[in-house]
């Protein structure tokens, strides 16, 4: 039976909790959990508690036993008539962490006890009001023979076999955490702006300490940044981070005890790439920033998820821009948004940043809630200005500290702090779909008239799309490359709207949507030489990159549909390579051709049917043409961009390596991987190692390199994940499915580990032409594995179903094969609620 939850059905919980006390006696097969919860009545109503998979041994109210049989599947209801206004509910339950392969609640990872309670994991631990608007201080006793015993808050006492923790800050159950294991810490301390000392620990398995330093440095930078940028100070005596190998997501912001997927903690030059380092810094920041945006102020219900996630992503993006290059970060974020969120918004899984119904909340940790949620905040900031934003955030923290809030509360602080009416703006939160902005230009007697239209296609459940407020940042570039109008923000509020610019000498080129000022797609007539002018002269880095990217995309689409294309892009690359040394990261971004998925998306958006094989072949051909046309410059840059001296994971070094690898990628199309082989043998860092390996795989010259890599890193799970991933992702499409199948048969394909599963199966689904192989082998292989994983780990299975969200854009043959594969999954006996919801929506 599927039950849909509706936002409109939310009702306040009848009770508040004065304190929650928990005692754990940990054992792999039979952990005992004793709870005491002090309830006080606030409103009329029964006591309703959530529980899942619990063996209930005892229940009591104020010490008077209740029959444990009263617990039904999933719920325990005690009628109001049986309850005084203030009472203590107690329970004793038994749970089995070792059997918990879903990694939700209390489970074991590599012999270590750990928890994951967001969104509804706590009900797998004990009976509780498992909803984010019920907040309580927690006192937790952990008994175990493991040497390190951790929970939220401050340590009260610690002795061999037992530790007591107290978290004074009221929190919902989803922020509860417990860890018990054989762990070692690297430790440091941070003095807050008020002068309080905070003990910091990053806990890892013995032997991993030498790879935890960067996580610690990132934590310290995050704490300092949040004080400087938002005036937010940390509020406990200790901050613990624990790295675990088995984790469904990236990391989790449990109060004072963040739990991380080990791939977002552990890094060394030899084992992690520049991208890994940047992600570690960003996610450490993200989870730390949640302490204020998520923990001190949390969500009233799960429909409001983007209240904490959109804002915290926005804050981590600001942090990374401040630590690294703002321009490069913005372009990366736009790339991710387009690749993941625009794709989601254009298909059957489209939903607004604040949905109003769901079946399984774990299916809503999406690019829309996270990344679009962040874009919406970026627009708000642009509309109210930096000062308005700062005033609104100060008011938010002041007004709502300690509360569980809604998007309405969030919008209200902006209205109150700035005096703006944000009624229309709110549609960004409630409406799904990506607006398509079209621009028509009229030039006459020194006057440029820009007429914009906005249109949003219907999305599931939302046929009508009224116009939204769209901040359009633009500038004007004269024909000689000079900027004749600096960045100006137009506020579009109507379906169609014109803006005039007078007194211009010669017809300028519009540099549109500077800084990607709104999450929209743009359709405009622009000549290749105008795009080249923007690429050469625009003052806005994002708009420059976009101009080059559009040139490449137009060329690729012309080719993919049979025509010649890409010559203008190739010419523009010439100019770019000449001054690549002054901005290597930017040059690398421009050199990277649009991916096959993006080409397919663009073809579909323009009303065509993408042919994955043709897209692959023509993209390869353009890459080869560009390499041939610019070989000397690329070869020179490849040499010049070496980074001598010891590896440092900073933005500068990363920029040089990214340009070097972009050159190598193109050159490998000419030298059959000769340079890549040399680099693979000589590289002392994983960035170049992996970059070279990817080139060798694409060139089909990978046997020795892969064998050497596996020999060297067989003991390192995270590095071996890369080994699995790059093969599935980079193998030539005609070989990839067979290769993935072979890899899946290896004894070290530990598929119950989410990282390993995602590496191989996710690697293949991201190999566009392989996943969409015309014979359906990519679809069938993927579904075989999803069916195997679903009973073990529904969350990870369900998330990976989104590989199929674009299936209707392909030809009839592929559609039939995708439908057949999805049909098998849908018909599977005992399919989880998580996957059932995904497949139903995808097939709808
Ligand atoms: N709140 C975390 C994300 C997260 C969500 C669910 C999880 O388990 C199902 C785990 C982590 C974040 O935004 O980082
Ligand atoms: Zn988050």
Image (cartoon, grey):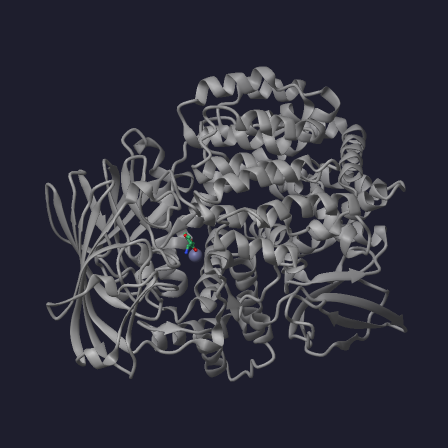
From the top left corner, tell me how far across and down residue 685 is, in percent.
49, 27
Question: Quadrant of the rendered structure where residue 296 is?
Answer: bottom left
Number of labelled discs? 0
The residue that appears at 54% across and 75% down in the rendered structure is 384
Say if 658 sits above or below 498 in the image: above
Q: Nearer the viewer, residue 810 or 484?
A: 810
Lateral position of residue 389 relative to residue 351, left or right: left
Q: Nearer the viewer, residue 717 or 376?
A: 717
From the top left corner, tell me how far across and down residue 445 is, in percent.
90, 73
Question: Quadrant of the rendered structure where residue 454 is?
Answer: bottom right
Say if 192 sits above or below 815 in the image: below
Quadrant showing the C terminus: bottom right
Q: Looking at the image, in which quadrant does ligand 2 appear?
A: bottom left
Say if 613 sits above or below 707 in the image: below
Q: Residue furthest top?
A: 704
From the top left corner, tell me how far across and down residue 150 is, in percent.
22, 48
From the top left corner, tell me how far across and down residue 756 is, in percent.
47, 35
Q: Is residue 400 visible?
A: yes
The residue that appears at 52% across and 22% down in the rendered structure is 683
């Amino acid at each position: 039976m599927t039950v849909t939850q509706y936002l409109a059905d939310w009702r306040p919980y009848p009770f508040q909790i004065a304190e929650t006390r928990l005692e754990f006696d940990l054992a792999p097969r039979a952990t005992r959990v004793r709870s005491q919860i002090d309830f006080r009545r606030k409103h009329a109503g029964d006591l309703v508690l959530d529980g899942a998979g619990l063996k209930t041994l005892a229940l009591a109210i104020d010490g008077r036993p209740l029959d444990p049989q009263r617990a039904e599947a999933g719920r325990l209801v005690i009628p109001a008539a049986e309850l005084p206004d203030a009472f203590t509910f107690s329970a004793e339950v038994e749970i089995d962490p070792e059997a918990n392969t879903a990694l939700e609640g209390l489970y074991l990872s590599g012999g270590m006890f750990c928890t994951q309670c967001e969104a509804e994991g706590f009900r797998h631990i004990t009976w509780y009001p498992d909803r984010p608007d019920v907040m309580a201080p927690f006192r937790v006793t952990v008994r175990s023979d493991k040497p390190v015993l951790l929970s939220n808050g401050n340590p009260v006492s610690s002795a061999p076999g037992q530790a007591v923790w107290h978290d004074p800050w009221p929190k919902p159950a989803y922020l509860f955490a417990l860890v018990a294991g054989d762990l070692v810490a690297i430790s440091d301390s941070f003095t807050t702006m008020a002068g309080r000392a905070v003990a910091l620990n990053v806990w890892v398995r013995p032997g991993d300490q030498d790879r935890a330093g960067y996580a610690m440095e990132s934590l310290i930078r995050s704490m300092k940044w949040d004080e400087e940028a938002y005036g937010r100070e940390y509020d406990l005596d200790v901050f613990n981070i624990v790295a675990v190998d088995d984790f469904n997501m990236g990391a989790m912001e449990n109060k004072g005890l963040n739990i991380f997927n080990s791939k977002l903690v552990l890094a060394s030059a030899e084992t992690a790439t520049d991208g890994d380092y940047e992600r570690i810094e960003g996610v450490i920041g993200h989870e730390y920033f949640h302490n204020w945006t998520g923990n001190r102020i949390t969500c009233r219900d799960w429909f409001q998820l983007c209240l904490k996630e959109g804002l915290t992503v926005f804050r981590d993006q600001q942090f990374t821009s401040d630590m690294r290059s703002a321009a490069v970060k913005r372009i990366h974020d736009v790339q991710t948004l387009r690749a993941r969120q625009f794709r989601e918004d254009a298909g059957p899984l489209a939903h607004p940043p604040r949905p109003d119904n769901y079946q399984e909340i774990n299916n809503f940790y999406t690019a829309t809630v996270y990344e679009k949620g962040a874009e919406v905040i970026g627009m708000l900031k642009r509309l109210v200005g930096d000062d308005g934003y700062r005033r609104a955030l100060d008011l938010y923290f002041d007004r709502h500290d300690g509360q569980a809030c809604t998007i309405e509360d969030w919008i209200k602080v902006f209205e109150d702090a700035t005096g703006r009416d944000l009624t229309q703006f709110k549609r960004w939160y409630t409406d799904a779909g990506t607006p398509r902005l079209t621009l028509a230009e009229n030039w006459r007697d020194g006057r440029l008239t820009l007429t914009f239209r906005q249109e949003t296609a219907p999305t599931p459940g939302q046929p009508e799309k009224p116009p939204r407020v769209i901040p359009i940042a633009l500038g004007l570039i004269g024909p000689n490359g000079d900027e004749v109008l600096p960045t100006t923000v137009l506020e579009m509020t109507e379906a169609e709207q014109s803006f005039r610019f007078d007194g211009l000498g010669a017809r300028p080129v519009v540099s549109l949507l500077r800084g990607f000022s709104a999450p929209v797609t743009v359709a405009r007539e622009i000549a290749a030489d105008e795009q080249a002018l923007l690429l050469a002269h625009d003052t806005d880095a994002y708009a420059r990159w976009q101009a080059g990217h559009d040139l490449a995309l137009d060329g690729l689409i012309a080719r993919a549909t049979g025509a010649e294309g890409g010559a203008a892009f190739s010419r523009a690359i010439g100019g770019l390579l000449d001054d690549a040394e002054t901005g290597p990261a930017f040059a690398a971004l421009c050199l990277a051709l649009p991916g096959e998925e993006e080409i397919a998306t663009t073809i579909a958006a323009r009303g065509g049917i993408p042919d994955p094989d043709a897209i692959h072949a023509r993209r390869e051909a353009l890459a080869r043409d560009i390499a041939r046309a610019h070989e000397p410059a690329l070869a020179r840059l490849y040499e010049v961009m070496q980074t001598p001296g010891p590896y440092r994971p900073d933005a500068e070094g990363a920029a040089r390596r990214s340009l070097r690898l972009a050159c190598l990628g193109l050159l490998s199309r000419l030298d059959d991987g000769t340079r890549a082989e040399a680099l693979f043998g000589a590289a002392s860092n994983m960035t170049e190692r992996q970059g070279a390996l990817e080139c060798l795989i694409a060139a089909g010259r990978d046997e020795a390199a892969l064998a050497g890599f596996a020999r060297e890193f067989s003991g390192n799970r995270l590095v071996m994940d890369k080994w699995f991933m790059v093969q599935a992702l980079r193998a030539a499409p005609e070989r990839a499915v067979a290769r993935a199948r072979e890899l899946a048969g290896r004894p070290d394909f530990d598929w119950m580990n989410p990282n390993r599963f995602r590496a191989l199966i996710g690697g293949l689904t991201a190999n566009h032409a392989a996943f969409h192989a015309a014979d359906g082998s990519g679809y069938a292989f993927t579904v075989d594995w999803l069916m195997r994983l679903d009973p073990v780990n529904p969350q990870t299975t369900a998330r990976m179903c989104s590989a199929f969200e674009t299936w209707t854009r392909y030809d009839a043959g592929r559609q039939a094969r995708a439908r057949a594969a999805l049909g098998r999954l849908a018909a599977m006996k005992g399919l989880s609620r998580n996957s059932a919801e995904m497949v139903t929506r995808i097939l709808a």
